[in-house]
Amino acid sequence: MDRGPRHCDAEQVYDYDVLVLGSGPSGQKAAIAASKLGRRVGIVDRRDMIGGVCINTGTVPSKTLREAVLYLTGLSQRDLYGSNYRVKDEITVSDLAARTQHVIARQTDVIRNQLARNKITMITGIGRFADAHSIWVDGGSGGRESKVSADKIIIAAGTRPARPGSVDFDDRTIVDSDGVINLQAVPRSMVVVGAGVIGMEYASMFAALGTKVTVVERREKMLDFCDDEIIESLKYHLRDLSVTFRFGEEVAAVERHQTAALCILKSGKKIVADTVMYSAGRQGQTEDLALEAAGLEADRRGRIEVDVNYRTATDNIYAVGDVIGFPALASTSMEQGRLAAHHACGEPAREMHQLQPIGIYTIPEISFVGKTEDELTDANTPFEVGIARYRELARGQIVGDSYGMLKLLVAPDDGKLLGVHVFGTGATDIVHIGQAVMGCGGTVDYLVDAVFNYPTLSEAYKVAALDASNKIRNITRIDG
């Protein structure tokens, strides 16, 4: 429940008006938003973690790795030049790491410059609560501990991969999603435990590199929040890259041997692989924050509960980003940070926009916004489907993508867009056209009448809109 904004205590003098714990996407945007509102702002993080997990071990490295894989393998060009086409025959980890380290270094510089330009003080170290208005900062490496105070504190501590206690991780043979980017060699075989977003992104990347990948998932399907048709297309293409799926299976034990690992499933199956990667969800990084000193607590997954304005149970403390749980995306975390900072600074409260796109960087990539067919069917909401396939577009042929598709879900009575689902090259970019039309209350008629650049993948919107409109017209003619 919203408790309304609280203003600074005129009697108390603090070091900062707003202090942010963590410099990931949500922390950065919170700090910058508060600074733009004229507040004195500090941000606490380790020297080697500027930009948070997003920049250093998560989103940016994994997506950079994906681009390096696509380029070096020549995978996206094989429709044009044949299935044996390669840019480089023997791809090494150093080939992949070079691009990743370059991007991380550049992005870190960008973040430092943004914080400096906005006159945000960077406090280097690990923070923990002394009380609701004070933070102890451990500088590490023999540096002494210091104490800073703030009127408002925003927790943006992020998450780390959850590690089951029964698994003997060694960051070489048995790794988590943070450790996989530091492998010393491209494995010949890999078992990916967990068919969630992160698991499927890495499974597709290593499969593209030629690694024989087996995905083990205890549920009966993967990415069950996505459109079924698109997930079937993804499975088809991953199987074409020799990925094996073991759905409805659980790992009972992993034995580490000198040169490989032996995965034993509860069904009795045994799988030998060079590397086993666990993708078992994320754990909030709250255990070292001394939350109890500020009157707070986290759940068993390290997550902090907040209200609609991202305020915690302690009035002057907010929490944003992955540490508060779903949807735990860099995109939504940034917006949470901005909104929390505005509320903390007494600005009028605003809620997160309801239309939030989901982007999944598998190979090929997936993105969607709005409802799925299953959700609309369960809600007894009528809809018509319009589909455009990349192979029908000149641009699809030019870029060598013959499998991509765009699907529109349209309300037959008023033509409003109910959902947009994209699979293939540029999916995470072109989904925003549909998001903008939906957000502005536009209809399928807008897309039918709009003129798109030619040749582009975005032209798929016009093709899909015409497909849906023609179906609706035919039904209306017969029904009427």
Image (cartoon, rainbow, N blue to C red):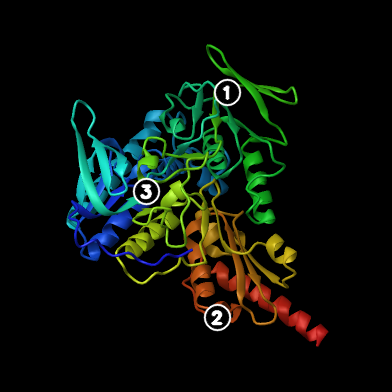
Please name the residue that numbered disc 2 is placed on.
446
Q: Earlier in the sequence, mark 1 or mark 2?
A: 1
Q: In this view, does 108 lie above or below 379?
A: above
- Identify the secondary structure beneath mark 3: loop
Instruction: Please tell me whether residue 147 is drawn above or below residue 405 in the rendered image.
Output: above
Report the residue that reaches farthest toward the top: 258
Cα distance between the residues tagged 2 and 3: 40 Å
Q: Give the quarter of the image for residue 184.
A: top left
| Circle 2: element type | helix
Q: Locate the C terminus and report the quarter of the image it occupies.
A: bottom right
Q: Residue extending furthest front?
A: 11
The residue under label 1 is 166
Task: Give the mark nearer the N terminus: 2 vs 3.
Answer: 3
For label 3, the residue is 156
In this rendered view, identify the residue nearer to me: 244 or 325.
325
Q: What element carries label 1?
A: loop
Which residue is at 23% across, 48% downward?
149
Horizontally, is 275 left or right of 234 in the view?
left
What numbered label is drawn on residue 149?
none
